[in-house]
Amino acid sequence: MTVLLMTPPMTQLNTPYPATAYLTGFLRSRGYEAVQRDPAIELFLEMMTAPALDIIRQHVEDNFESFEDDELPDAVFSFLAEFDRYRLCVEPVIRFLQGKDSSLALRITSRRFLPEGPAFDAIEQMEAVSGDILKTAFGQLGVQDKAKYLATLFINDLSAVITQGVDPYFEVSRYGERLAAANPSFDDLYNTLMGEPSFSSEILEQLVEQYLEETQPSVVALTVPFPGNMLGALRIAQTCKSINPDLPVVLGGGFINTELRALKDPRVFEFVDFLCLDDGERPFMTLLEFFDGKREIDELVRTYFLAEDENGEPFVHYNENAELHDIPQTDVGTPIYDGLPLTEYLSLCEMLNPMHRIWSDGRWNKLTIAHGCYWRKCSFCDVTLDYIDRYDAAGADILVDRIEELIAETGQTGFHFVDEAAPPKALFALARRLIERGVVISWWGNIRFEKTFTPERCQLLADSGCIAVSGGLEVASDRLLKLMKKGVSVEQVARVTKAFSDADILVHSYLMYGFPTQTEQETIDALDMVRQMMAQGCFQSAFWHRFAATAHSPIGINPEEYGITLVERPDILFAENDVDFTDPTGTDHDMLGDGLRKALYNYMHGIGFDQPMDFWFDKPVKSTLVKKDLISKAINHVIASH
C-alpha cells in the first residue's frame, strides 16, 4: 500500500509545512510505503515563470478590457506598463531567492533592474520619516539582505497582480481563506468547486495528475493546516476523484481539527472519503488498517465518514473509539523530508526587522519538543482541544537523536520547534544535551514568558543555539492578564524578554486588543507599555491580533464569566471557530486597531518612539496613565538584584 501525502496551497514559501514530513516518518517507521509532495510551493513556482506571466497578462487584459488606465488597480497598472521588465526579471529573481544566484544581488540593489510597483511605496513612506531606511537597515555591505528585501517586494507586486487581476482566491500564504474560515455553510466552497476552474487551480490539477502518475498511490492524504488550504485541498481531492473515483482521499490537519468538529454537510464527501481529527498518527494508521482489512469501520479513531440511516439517506457519521490511545511522542519517529523539493523553497525578507523575517527567511527543520501545552489555562485558547490539552514530552536524548537524523538527511542545521509553548524544563535539558553532545544548530520556538527564564538560563539557551523566541504579552494589562489566566504580569514579561535580548536572542511578542471588557484607556496604556519595552530593547518584533472568541475556549464556553454575551449562531453544518459576541464596554476597537498597527510598524523599524500616543490615531484618544519609567524600573530592579 502506497500512501501519498500532500500539503495544499498556500502555506510558507521558505520551508515545507511539517505535517506530511511528520506522518511520512511515522508511517515508514511502521512499515508503510509513504511518499510526499508539496503542491503549495510547486504551484507558486509554476506561476512565477516567464511563460506563466504571458498567460497572466492575457487574463488581466481580458478582465480589464473596458477599464481606463486610471481605473486599474495600482499593481495591475504597473504590471501592464512594465510587462517586459517583469517578464525578464521573474525567473532570475526566483533563482536568487532560492539561493542559486547570489551574484544577482548587486543588480537588484541598484534599484534599476526590477520594476517597482506599489509594494515599493513602503520604502518611500519610511524614508519620509527617517531618511535612508535601506542604508540604516543594511549598511554598506548588507547587499544580499537588501536585495532579498527588494526581490520580496517584487514578488509581492506580482502576487497582487494575480489576486486583483486573475484569481481572487490566490494569495502567497492564504488561498481562498474567506471561503472556509468559520463559515457555518459549505455553500460558498461548494459553488466555487462546481464553477469554472481558476488559473491557479488549472495548474494545481496538472501537478496532481503528475504526482498520481509518478507515485501510483493506494491512498491520498491531505493536511489542511489553515482555512486558506481548504479550497486547494478540495481541488486536489476533486482532481484525484476525476482520475480514479475509487482512490480513497483523507483530510486532516489544524483547520479540520479546530473548525470542522460539528461537520454535518454530506456534500463534503463528494470530494473526500474520510476526515481525521487531532493527532493524525493513530487515526490514520487505524484507517490504513481498515483499508487492509485488519479493522472494522466501527473501530476507526476520531474519523468522519458518510453513512446511511435506516431509510438509506446519507448522513455524516463520526467514530470516536476512545479505546485506542494516541501514539506517545517517544514513538512517533523522526520527520522525513524525502520527496519534498528542499532546494526550491524561497527565502524572503518581508520586513526590515531581524526577528519578523525569521518566519519567511531560511530553511527550518521542524520538530516538537512536547505535544500540547504544559500550562493550558489561558481563557482565550482552545484548551479543550487535543492539540493543547494533551501534554506529552519525548525527552532530551530522543530529541537530540532526531535533530542529528534530520541534519544528516537535509544538510540543514536550522530548527524551528513548533510547540504551542515549549516547556522550560525540557528546553533547559535539551540545551544542556546539545552542548554536551557537541551538536551545533540554530533554533527558535514559542514559549511563555515565565520568571524561570533568568538571565543565566537565557544565556544557556543562547549557548545551545537559540537565536529567537516568541511569546505572548497579549493585552499588556495586569487586570486583563489575570482575567485571561495568562500567569504573567507586564513587569515580569519586561524582565524576561530583556534577559533574552541581553543574551542576543531575538524576541517576538504576540499582542492582543479587543479582549472582553478592555477599555480604551487600557488599550492606550498597553500601547505605551509596548513602546517602552521596545525602546528598552526588551523585544524587537511584535504583532497586534484582534481578539476573537472561539468555540472551544473557556471564553466561548462560559462567556458570562468574562462579561460578554455571545451572538446567536446559525445552525452549524460546516465550519465553526470564531463566535461573535457583544461587549457592553463599547470600546471602538476598529479605530484603535488601526493606530496600534501603525505605531507598532514604526516601532519595529526603530522610529516613532518619541511621538505622543494620540499621534497614531485618526480620532482623539485618552492620554496614557503609564509612568514613563515603569519598564526601565522593572528591568533595572532585576539587573540590580543580580
Image: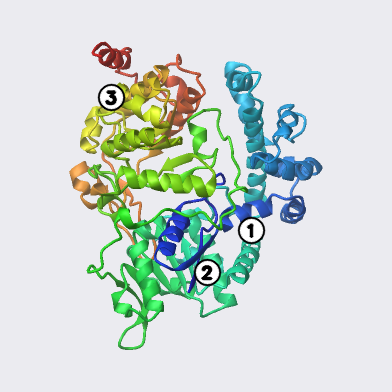
Q: Which residue is mark 3?
A: 454
- Classify 10 Å Cα crowding around label 3: few (below 14), some (14-19), many (20 and above): some
Dots 1, 2 in contact, CB < 8 A: no
Percent from the top left, x then y, of residue 359? Answer: 49, 39
User: Which of the two discs, 1 and 3, labels the residue nearer the N terminus?
Assistant: 1
Tell me what residue is drawn at x 65 percent, y 29 percent: 144
In what element is the residue under mark 2? helix
Q: In the shown orientation, is residue 519 left or right of residue 416?
A: left
Quarter placement of the C terminus: top left
Mark 1 crowd level (few <14, some 14–19, many ≥20, 10 Å Cα): some
Q: Is residue 239 left or right of residue 587?
A: right
Task: Tell me the residue at 73%/56% (across/down).
Answer: 59
Residue at the left extreme, as displayed: 561
The answer to whether residue 225 shows anywhere in this view is no
Q: CA distance from mark 1 to mark 2?
A: 15 Å
Of badges 1 and 3, nearer the viewer stands: 3
Q: Is residue 472 above or below residue 6?
A: above
Tell me residue 85's x, y (percent): 79, 40
The residue at which mark 1 appears reads as 200
Marks 2 and 3 sit apart, C-alpha to C-alpha, by 50 Å
The mark nearer the N terminus, 1 or 2, is 1
Q: Secondary structure at mark 3?
A: loop
| 509 and 82: which is toward the camera | 509
- Label 1, label 3: how many angstroms apart (C-alpha)? 50 Å
